[in-house]
Image (cartoon, grey):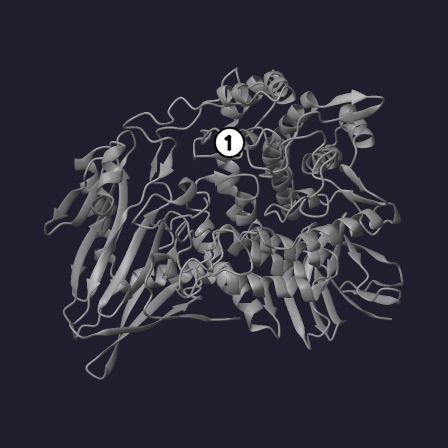
Amino acid sequence: MLDVIKWEFPLLRPHTGMMFGNGTSGLLVWGEGEQLRITIGRADFWDHRGGMSWTEKQNYTRIRSCLERNDADGIAEIFSCDTEKVPGMPERPSVVPVGRMDLQLPPGALLCRGELELRSGSGMIFYHYEGCEYGVKVALAMRRQVFTIELPPEHKIGISVVPSAHIMQEEFKQIGIAAPELLNDHGVSGWIQPLPSDPALCVGYRCKENVIWSVTARDTDFVRLRQSAESLLNQAVGEGIDIFKRELRLWWDEYWADVPKIETPNEKIDFIYYFGLYKFAAFTNPEGIPATLQGPWIEEYRFPPWSSDYHFNINVQMCYWPAYKANRLSHLLPMFNMVFSWKGQLRHNARCFVGIDDGYMMPHAVDDRCTCMGSFWTGTIDHGCSAWIAQMMYQYYLYSGDLAFLRDEVFDFMRGVMRVYEAMLEKKDGVYVLPVSVSPEYRGDRMDAWGVNASFQLAAIHRMCEDLIDASTKLGMDPDAKWLEIRENLPLFSVFVDGENAKIGLWDGTDLEESHRHHSHLASICPFDTIDYTDVQWSGIVNNTLTHWIKQGMGLWTGWCMPWASMLHSRLKNGPMAELILEIWQKVFTNEGHGTLHDVNFPGLSLMGAAPMCASAAPIHNIAGVRGEIMQMDAGMGAVAAVQDMFLHSRRGINYVFSGTPQRWKRAEFRDMPCEGGVLVSGMIQYGTVCELEVKAPRDAMLRLGNPHPGAAVRIEYSSGRENITSAAVLELSFKAGECCRIVPA
């Protein structure tokens, strides 16, 4: 396992800094020379004003009528936002920047490097002074909002605080956010930042000997908030640094204990995996806030791009993809529980949209209260957002076997999501049709950004039907006849005919016309897995589609496009390209401090956010991009999932090993990686040949596994003494709890 991640100073921007997080609080440690800066963020520090309420005017019939009449004014009126451009009010809710703490090292000191120890979650920042090297140690607790900075006892270090309200004074004033109250006494120093209609935030600190203890706390009452911060500091300081370190180490020991290990000959892949899993823990801690676009790592100098909200048209999903095969299912529950807490609002949305009382509908971008973030109409009606979360909930059951969770929470949500689709579908000549549908972000919010039978939505519907039918069986129920009928009579995707070639279209009559960041028309391959593309019925169409997709290139891709593309290539057994795309992503879509970017870090691959290449005699680079540096966590988490998929993934209910690993790899292995069915799989490959494969079953389980030696016979040796020899393409394995087996050439 990779143990240490390194940074080289100077680090000139917050998002190049060393990252520490516990899901709620986040630190970015950066700086240059004798200035060490610590940017502080809170994922739950929302200003909830603004946004759009879903009303009766946002109904499917009216929207359809306007679209079919090309009535742009009508669509604009339907999706107008009551709070947009109201003086003194934000247009939409947003996570609010907090600020930073600056440390003044001795005059003439020079920051040189940083080292993060993955196993303990703590970091050392080294500086040179008068011919010697000294270290500052930073650590953030995982179960409380406390962080520590251990300073060299030899030096006096200056401390100053920089609230975001001081950096962004005019921006805060324009939307009615008051100036902070500075604190500076023996009990607690720091500041309190009020919000107009939400609890204030206190950043408090205290120095004792060579340790700076700092806390963040929230409350609506300033006096109570200050007392709370002081109480948290008293407790932490009273317990002492040894207890703090022991508590932190215990949390990380428990986290890493059952995370699957991998080993490859490619250091970049190992780095993406292990550093990504560290960030996944810091981002999705089950005791923290459900993961937003940026999580707790909010820059102090501006409001975060897209409010650091919840984007459900891929971004939230990608943020959580690693949980399943990382053996960290508990990390999914805060997000699921947040969605369940919105059921009343989701019912209201479905009632307004299609006039039913038993549906659930979620727009693509919301705050933590499910307030719709604005007037992007194609995102608002993208019901695939709800279906995608429903799929992830059912995957949780497939991995965990938690039948009670399926029965009590998930099945109802899945059924409610499907009810909205049922209300949207029409039947013509025995075939179901989705008359108005969108493909995420394709053509933006133009009046032609829709069509009949968007392939993305068809794949989502088929995924819902398959999962609901399967879930009904698991729960001992008869599946709804409507689901069976839709499954049999709804196209799997829209077919676009181009001369003699047939391809998967965006929707009826629309081909992929350009490079596009959202591979949504390929969703029937991944993530919804609704077609067997090796079947002769579909293989020609899929090949034509992928050829065209590759031809259109990466010129308009964003950071999060890349891991999804890698996963597609893994499923197509194209390991060299699955590997290369991740290498390109790391090179182009991360910055010099390993921060994961939405836009390119330099021009030449994609135009997404790239600075002009020939605008002046300036060097060709894109340190900040034309939109400024946009850090998002989705691509980094998606990259972890893409690495996992190289080793193990499921296609049409069959699990495959090493489908995405390059054949030239001399040796690679993975250990105890979960798959659907709840079993743990381990394997080793040498030059494309599987030489070890083992399966463990923590509970009674059935597993369908692609033969690791296609066309050859294998011996299945169970720990119980059972043995079986077969050359079947798919191995049907059954286990009792605690049983394991080895699969070797016969």
Residue 249 is left or right of residue 558, and the answer is left
Determine the secondary structure under disc 1: loop
Residue 618 is left or right of residue 163, and the answer is right
Compare residues 79 and 555 and report the one nearer the observer: 555
Compare residues 587 and 76 and report the one nearer the observer: 76
Q: Which residue is drawn at the image coordinates 72% and 56% (left, top)?
A: 571
Residue 239 rendering spot, x and y as whole percentages: 25, 57
Q: Which residue is drawn at the image coordinates 72% and 59% (left, top)?
A: 739
Compare residues 263 and 313 and report the one nearer the observer: 313
**Residue 104 seen in the figure:** yes
Residue at the farthest bottom position? 131
Residue 709 sits in which quadrant? bottom right
In this picture, is 446 found above or below 547? Answer: above
Residue 88 is left or right of residue 687, and the answer is left
In which quadrant is the C terminus drawn?
Answer: bottom right
In this picture, is 336 found above or below 113? Answer: above
Residue 679 rendering spot, x and y as whole percentages: 68, 55
Residue 257 rendering spot, x and y as whole percentages: 52, 62
Q: Which residue is drawn at the image coordinates 58% and 51% (left, top)?
A: 561
Q: Could you classify mark 1 by the number of other residues whose Cα lies within 10 Å: few (under 14), some (14-19), or many (20 or more)?
A: some
Residue 695 is left or right of residue 560, and the answer is right
Residue 520 rendering spot, x and y as whole percentages: 65, 43
What kind of residue is marked 1? Phe
**Residue 205 seen in the figure:** no
Residue 487 sits in which quadrant? top right
Compare residues 606 and 689 and report the one nearer the observer: 606
Q: Which residue is mark 1?
A: 376
Q: How many marks?
A: 1
